[in-house]
Amino acid sequence: MKVIIAAAVLAALGAGAAFAQADVIKARQEAMKAAGAATGPVGKMLKGEEAFDLAKVQAALRAYSDTAKKSAALYPDNSKTGGDTAALPAVWEKKADFTAKFEAWDKEAAAALASIKDEASFKATFPNVLKNCGGCHETYRAKKS
């Protein structure tokens, strides 16, 4: 009887771990989708397809900062696979650099939030914020096919 109970407990723990793994992968995907959604309008502004809107720029920068602050914690060792993750093994192999990239993104977003006051400062500053996104994606995210 004790063996059956122990087996049931272990099975429940295993299922709980798999569920937790899927939750953290889903959480980081949702965080990145939110950052991507915030980028849409500002990307159009950079291309001249949409009029400059300081409030939208500020909202995007706040979304980036929020995502950057919480994202490093969304890559625990037990979330390397599963959940349709696009995270490459380099995330865990170069964890310090990976975490530093989120810190740099947060600092760049905060600096841009303080310095962007008009369209000219937006066009001069915002591309540097986006470089942080691309730099991380190149090294740590699998390319979509």
Image (cartoon, rainbow, N blue to C red):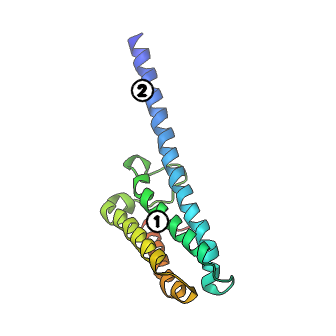
Residue 70: image location, x then y, percent: 44, 56
| Residue 145 visible in the picture | no
| Disc 2 packing (10 Å; few <14; some 14–19; many ≥20) | few
Query: Going by the picture, which residue comes out furthest to the bottom?
Result: 120
Q: Nearer the viewer, mark 2 or mark 1?
A: 1
Quick one: quadrant of the C terminus? bottom right
| Residue 106 visible in the picture | yes
Residue at the image point whose x is 32% and y is 63% from the top: 94
Secondary structure beneath disc 1?
A: helix
Residue at the image point whose x is 43% and y is 16% from the top: 5
Badge number at residue 133: none
Secondary structure beneath disc 2?
A: helix
Q: Could you tell me how far apart the alpha carbons at marks 2 and 1 are, in whole angstroms?
A: 39 Å
Residue at the image point whose x is 51% and y is 66% from the top: 62
Residue at the image point whose x is 39% and y is 15% from the top: 3
The residue to which callout 1 is attached is 65
Query: Going by the picture, which residue comes out furthest to the left?
Result: 96
Q: Amino acid at mark 1?
A: Ser
The residue to which callout 2 is attached is 10
Quick one: quadrant of the N terminus? top left
State the residue in front, 77 or 103: 103
Residue 84: image location, x then y, percent: 55, 53
Q: Which callout, 2 or 1, points at the residue further toward the start of the chain?
A: 2
State the residue in front, 128 or 113: 113
| Vertical placement of residue 78 versus 51, above or below | above
Residue 129: image location, x then y, percent: 47, 77
Residue 134: image location, x then y, percent: 48, 74
Residues under numbered marks 2 and 1 in contact, where contact means CB atoms less than 8 Å apart: no
Q: Amino acid at mark 2?
A: Leu
| Disc 1 packing (10 Å; few <14; some 14–19; many ≥20) | many
